[in-house]
Image (cartoon, rainbow, N blue to C red):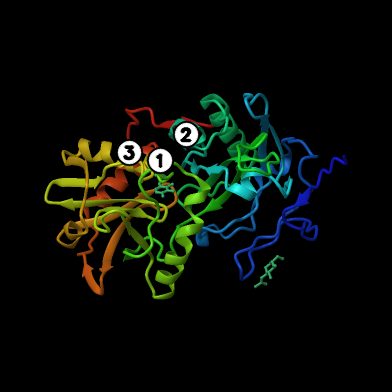
Amino acid sequence: MIKTSLLLRILARGPLITSCSSKNGSGYVAIRSASSLQEPYESSEDDESNNNIDWNNLGFGLMQTDYMYTMKCGKDEQFKQGQLTRYGNIELSPSAGVLNYGQGLFEGTKAYRREDGGLFLFRPQQNAIRMQIGAERMCMPSPSIEQFVDAVKQIALANKRWIPPSGKGSLYIRPLLMGSGSILGLAPASEYTFLVYASPVGNYYKEGTASLNLYVEDEYHRTMRGGAGGVKSITNYAPVLKAMCKAKDRGFSDVLYLDSENKRNVEEVSCSNVFILKGNVLSTPVTNGNILEGITRKSIMDIACDFSYKVEERCIPIEELIDADEVFCTGTAVGVAPVGSISYKGKRTEYKMSTELACLKLYSRLVEIQKGTIEDKRGWIVQVD
Ligand SMILES: *Cc1c(COP(=O)(O)O)cnc(C)c1O
Ligand SMILES: *[C@@H]1O[C@H](CO)[C@@H](O)[C@H](O)[C@H]1NC(C)=O
């Protein structure tokens, strides 16, 4: 029998572009591109310079950075040692578990630069724990918390020149865990890859910091009971694209999903959690396995307790949003975003906007903790350098 080892270059390598150049119309930034997996990391003089970037107009698009981190292990093994290499395309077998059966997870965390130049992460251990829980659900081995946090720190340091100046944005760090080994019949893959890359980002929505107009979807659902909605499985995201694109084409910012059983209870937005405020009570849907347990969600709940709000995790029927005082979304990518309107069954409900919104007060406190201008009494901040 002939043993074939087909290797697929997932994306054709683009032309080699030397030296930094500025952003063109598509938000693509040409940088030194180099072949991956060959050149190990070496800190050099020019790591500090990045003068051509317009830090004032960062959106949430991919801007290639210098280095990525890769660590592999076999099925039934443990991750041991990873390495930094130049950012570039990766090779995968056409029969890789992730390509054929969606055996993959992602995470998202950010590195911030403070006024004094120091680099910080926000609760990266929580992302590590969430990846471990997700890996168990998706039958994958996962990096230890120490390995995960160490990789995230290494990526922040190696790509330091891509971390925006204080207040202009952050370095979004994207860890992936995937079944990279070959498999033909449905089963867990034979090999796993933990990969971390990063991109500088500003605001997630084109609305910037303005309020969001959400479309309440009652036809498509994000997940269902017994599914994988509670973990950051890559399989939860492509199925929402249709509802999301339809809503965006009609001028909405994003979609708010309802539970698939009753088509009535609020779950979350495509990649953020949702809260409602009524009087002094702040409520968010209880995490019942359908909802991604956001780190921003948990942090905002803690901060709300500090401000003496009554915080409830419970089932929230859509009718309650209609007479809420405030509705807002939370996530690492979006931060805390006030909702200006929701549209449900042809009826639009608008919320009063002002600079006095409770959600903005909660968000300011979170940002102050991240900036270091207020005491981090819960140990949320991790210093990188
Ligand atoms: C990532 C994500 C969130 C937000 O989680 P954070 O940890 O706050 O970034 C919320 N909902 C979904 C579906 C997500 O994928
Ligand atoms: C931007 O650059 C990329 C890569 O060189 C190219 O594919 C794309 O067409 C460019 N877009 C514009 C609008 O020039």
Q: Spot the residue most to the left.
A: 279
Q: Residue at x 52, y 48 (%)?
A: 234
Of the pair 46 and 258, the residue shown nearer to us: 258
Q: Which label was assigned to residue 286?
A: none
Mark 3 highlights which residue? 299
Q: In the image, what residue type sits under mark 2?
A: Pro
Mark 1 highlights which residue? 371
Secondary structure found at label 1: helix
Of the pair 261 and 66, the residue shown nearer to us: 261
Decide if residue 74 is on the left or right side of residue 297.
Answer: right
Secondary structure found at label 3: helix
Of the pair 262 and 92, the residue shown nearer to us: 262
Q: Earlier in the sequence, mark 3 or mark 2?
A: 2
Q: Earlier in the sequence, mark 1 or mark 3?
A: 3
Residue 214 sits in quarter: bottom left
Residue 69 visible in the shown view? yes
Q: Which label was assigned to residue 124?
A: 2
Q: Residues within 10 Å of mark 2 (few under 14, many from 20)?
A: many
Residues marked 1 and 3 touching at CB (< 8 Å):
no
Q: Residue at x 25, y 54 (%)?
A: 265
Q: Spot the residue most to the right.
A: 2
Residues marked 1 and 2 touching at CB (< 8 Å):
no
Q: Residues within 10 Å of mark 3 (few under 14, many from 20)?
A: some
Q: In the image, what residue type sits under mark 1?
A: Lys
* Quadrant of the picture in which ligand 2 is shown: bottom right
Residue 385 visible in the shown view? no
Residue 72 sits in quarter: top right
| Disc 1/disc 2 C-alpha distance (Å) | 16 Å
